[in-house]
Amino acid sequence: MAAELWFPRSEQSFGGRALATARWCAGRGWPVHPLSAGRKTPAGNCEACRAPGHTHEGCTCLREGRWCHGFRAATLDPGRIGRWWGPGGRDRMGVGVSCGPAGLVVIDVDAHPQSLPARSRLLPGIPIADSVDLGGLANGFHTLGVLAALRGAAHPALDAGTLRVRTPSGGLHVWYRAHPGHRWKSSTGSGNGPALAWQVDIRAHGGYIVAPGTTTPHGGYAPLGGAREPALLPDWLAAELHRTGHLAPARQAPPRGSVPPPRARLAVAAAGGGHSAASKALEKVLAEVASCAAVPEGAAFSEKLNRAAYTVGGLAAAGHLSRAEAERTLTELAADVRPGQERRCEAIIRSGLQAGERRPLALGGRT
């Protein structure tokens, strides 16, 4: 199914099909990243990525606005999205959605022809006696259906109230929204780690999902039914994910006055190593920004980032630290805390710096 057909024509953006899809997803707060043309895997962007030991942390692609390292490059920035899927043949690239930052939990139901695993792996944590006949059990639709029946719930594949997407291999992606404050982990249903059911993968934090409208030589990812928005994750599925070890530990906010993240320590050191009044002021506001990483929303992130930028501007104007180094620290820290919101963060930082520079911060307070 062509991308321009899977959501209302009135909501399309100017551009090709993939660009329209990427903009539509980003408009819903779902960070996006490119997939290789005709494939469902992330697109690479530098030779260094093929070298042993190369990681996203040391890759310059992300800092320079190029896609690389899959979901870690996902963004909501309209300008970046326009460059990535704009003119030059890039419209052939597919669209991936980073599930964690998007607040999504996608149930990826597979229908691969495989031999049945050990009974303990069919429904992890639920014993299946040897006397139970497994005849006819062949894929993820069956195992998920059995799990739903055991819980007295409807099969998610039949949930017409949420976005469902058929895959080229005959599988199904059932899209849900996570409850606020819950961070679910991704898993592979046919692996040896935590799993909901055999041939049922979970796409959440640490994973991505192929956006509807993306096509490959084997077929397209086409919506099923009329729903175009994810519904809230059903309580019974949330309980099952919790039971099977999918709930990620909440990231704890650093205590007041704690040392800020590693990349921010250089700025603190440049301002006096944590001993001067200037460095203590900087350390405090950087730690406040970093604490927002533990809460995806409702953490007053904008206010804390603006306050940090205002403080940095005042310290720089008074000569206590390098404005360029401090600005770079703020930009990188904000990107870590709110990935995919670079343009918004840059505007907040720029405004705060300019306001702070008009009022230099002396060691004893504002001049």
Image (tube, helix red, strand yellow):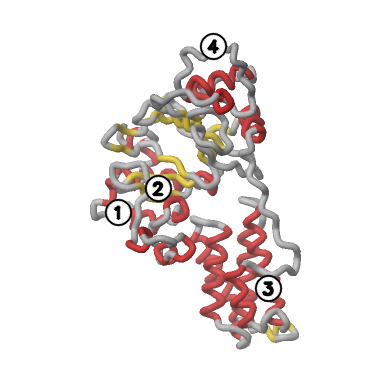
Residue identified by numbered label 3: 283
Residue identified by numbered label 2: 23
Residue 158 image position (x, y, % from top left)? 50, 21
Query: Tag 4's secondary structure?
Result: loop
CA gap, disc 2 and disc 3: 37 Å
CA gap, disc 1 and disc 4: 54 Å
Q: Quadrant of the C terminus?
A: bottom right
Numbered disc in front, either 2 or 3: 3
Graded by Cα atoms within 10 Å as few (under 14), some (14 to 19) or many (20 or more), the crowding at tag 4 reads: few
**Residue name at image x 62 percent, y 16 percent:** 129
Q: Nearer the viewer, residue 330 or 207?
A: 207
Image-quadrant location for residue 182: top right
Graded by Cα atoms within 10 Å as few (under 14), some (14 to 19) or many (20 or more), the crowding at tag 1 reads: some
Horizontal side of 150 relative to 209 (left or right) equals: right
Query: Tag 3's secondary structure?
Result: helix
Query: Do the residues under discs 1 and 4 have CB atoms within 8 angstroms?
Result: no
Q: Amino acid at mark 2?
A: Arg
CA gap, disc 3 and disc 1: 40 Å
Numbered disc in front, either 3 or 1: 3
Q: Amino acid at mark 1?
A: Gly
Horizontal side of 330 relative to 278 (left or right) equals: left
Mark with earlier residue (2, 1): 2
CA gap, disc 4 and disc 3: 63 Å
Residue identified by numbered label 1: 86
